[in-house]
Image (cartoon, rainbow, N blue to C red):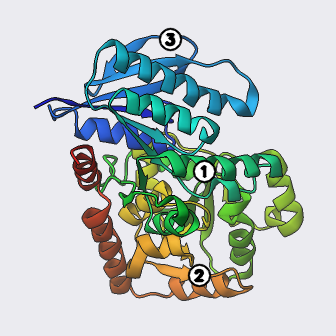
Amino acid sequence: MDVQHIFIVGSKGIPGAYGGYETFVDKLTEYHQDDTRFKYHVACKATENSEFEYHNARCFKVKVPKIGAAQAVLYDVYALKQCCKYIEKHNIPHPIVYCLACRIGPFARKFQKKIHKLGGKFYVNPDGHEWLRAKWPLPVRKYWKYSEKHMVKHADLLVCDSKNIEKYIQESYAKFKPQTTFIAYGAEIRRSRLADNDEKFTNWLAEKGLKPKEYYLVVGRFVPENNYETMIREFMLCKTPKNFALITNVNESFLDELKKKTGFDKDPRIKFVGTVYDQELLMKIREQAYGYFHGHEVGGTNPSLLEALASSDLNLLLDVGFNREVGEDTAIYWNKEKGNLAATIERVDALPAEEIKALANASTGRIANAYSWAFISNEYAGVWTL
């Protein structure tokens, strides 16, 4: 049998980057590195053009000029051009070119035609509702929506990482009769390699003024649609003696805005504790949290939600379709009505140990059964061999 060549465009590259797409590509190539049916070619954003091998994948660096927000679009265009050149030069039969995110809509038709001419297929992962994200100014949001439409129109297959996203694509673009499938994002289900008394963890706790099982936690990008304002306001309303640790890349202007709106700096329980890039330490911090807050409401299957369900005992999720789809009955849900989350925190504070343990086991089981990287990589193997 011919080897199936898969070209992946749209992540910043592997190894070493910790975004959602980067982790996905890292795990997919790791779990398929000994599978002789597949050969991966992964675009990596760089300052020079070169190649290296990682997880048996051919990683090719794509040099992109620094031109601001448009750099991401140019990166995908350059990477797709390199893919087509390589396929043509090496006479690769039936290649699959898999584009992550909907950035290059205006060029989608051109690339689909070129890939078809080379005997290949053009697959797209539409990501979440990028055009709804508050961080983008209106003209950029309009571009995202326009681009999404054209990516959907010209994709041979759309691999959606959320059933809600798949439903949205089917309903919003019914006139294009899009071919879609659902394969979720994945997560690790093992425990942290750090012991509870590991100095790396105990020193971090001491430095941040925290104690095991005596803090609520959130990990995520510091953007308005992740509902930091609601979580902070509600935490300030509740009477819990526990702390609220926020692991995030703080944006000073948004932080100042939150400070003015909520006065959180006067509540010693609320602690912005910086970022944590050590994955073993981050896993241990999740495991030793009393509860985990998830306020994301834009996007598909969120990596931080999967990691929390796999690691944290109690998960308190904003009640939207994306989060319900993943958490099902293994989590506790809250809404943005005043007092709702505060009351939820006080109720959760009083939960008996056996109820907490049952929820912890259920959420870890949910990830193991439907979101483990072994399961997800096997689902992709099915798509590559269609």
Q: Secondary structure at mark 2?
A: strand
Residue at 60% of width from left, 50% of height from top?
A: 148
- Between disc 2 and disc 1, the foreground one is 1
Task: Give the vertical position of 92 relative to 368 (above or below).
Answer: above
Place residue 162 in its image quadrant. bottom left
Measured in 3D between alpha carbons, the distance from the residue under mark 2 to the one under mark 1, in whole angstroms, is 31 Å
> Mark 3 is on which residue type?
Asn
Please state which of residues 79 and 249 is positioned toward the viewer in this rendering: 79
CA gap, disc 1 and disc 3: 28 Å
Circles 2 and 1: CB atoms closer than 8 Å: no
Lower sequence index among marks 1 and 3: 3
Q: Tell me, yes or no, if residue 169 can be seen here.
A: yes
- Between the residue at mark 3 and the residue at mark 2, the CA separation in whole angstroms equals 48 Å
Residue 60 in the image, given as x and y percentages of width and height: 42, 19
Residue 190 position, x and y percent, is: 28, 54
Residue drawn where x is 82% and y is 61% of the image: 258
Q: Earlier in the sequence, mark 3 or mark 2?
A: 3
- The three-letter amino acid code for the residue at tag 2 is Trp
Of badges 1 and 3, nearer the viewer stands 1
The percent coordinates of residue 241 (x first, y second) are 62, 76
Mark 1: few/some/many CA within 10 Å (<14, 14-19, 20+): many
Type of amino acid under label 1: Glu
Return the mark for residue 49.
Answer: 3
Please tell me which residue is depicted at 32% across the width and 30% down the height of the picture.
119
